[in-house]
Amino acid sequence: MIYQQKIAYQIIANWYAILIPIFILYLKTMFLL
């Protein structure tokens, strides 16, 4: 169970690593327009 939880945390961390920069870029473009 602990091993599965570690994999789940890694997947979530990877999603945040992808989504946060996109979200920051989105906010920047919204403020520029």
Image (cartoon, rainbow, N blue to C red):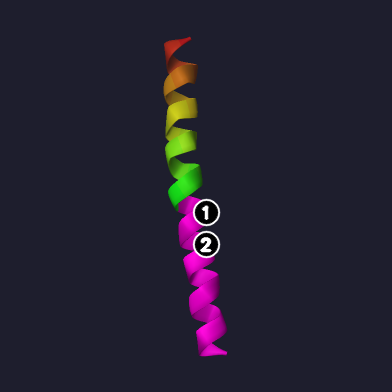
Q: Is residue 23 above or below residue 28?
A: below
Left or right for 8, reference 27: right
The magenta stretch spans which residues?
Answer: 1-16
Which of the 4 quarters of the picture holds residue 21? Answer: top left
Q: Are the residues flagged by discs 2 and 1 in contact, CB closer than 8 Å? A: yes
Q: Secondary structure at mark 2?
A: helix
Which of the 4 quarters of the picture holds residue 20? Answer: top left
- Residue 12 got which mark? 2
Query: How many other residues sit within 10 Å of disc 1, few (<14), some (14-19) or many (≥20)?
Result: few
Query: Residue 26 at x, y = what percent?
Result: 49, 27
Look at mark 1 in the image and give the residue it sits on.
Answer: 15
Query: How many other residues sit within 10 Å of disc 2, few (<14), some (14-19) or many (≥20)?
Result: few
Q: Is residue 6 above or below residue 20?
A: below
Of the residues shown, which amino acid type is indicated by label 2? Ile
Q: Secondary structure at mark 1?
A: helix
Residue 5 is inside the magenta segment: yes
For the residues labelled 2 and 1, the Cα–Cα distance comes to: 5 Å
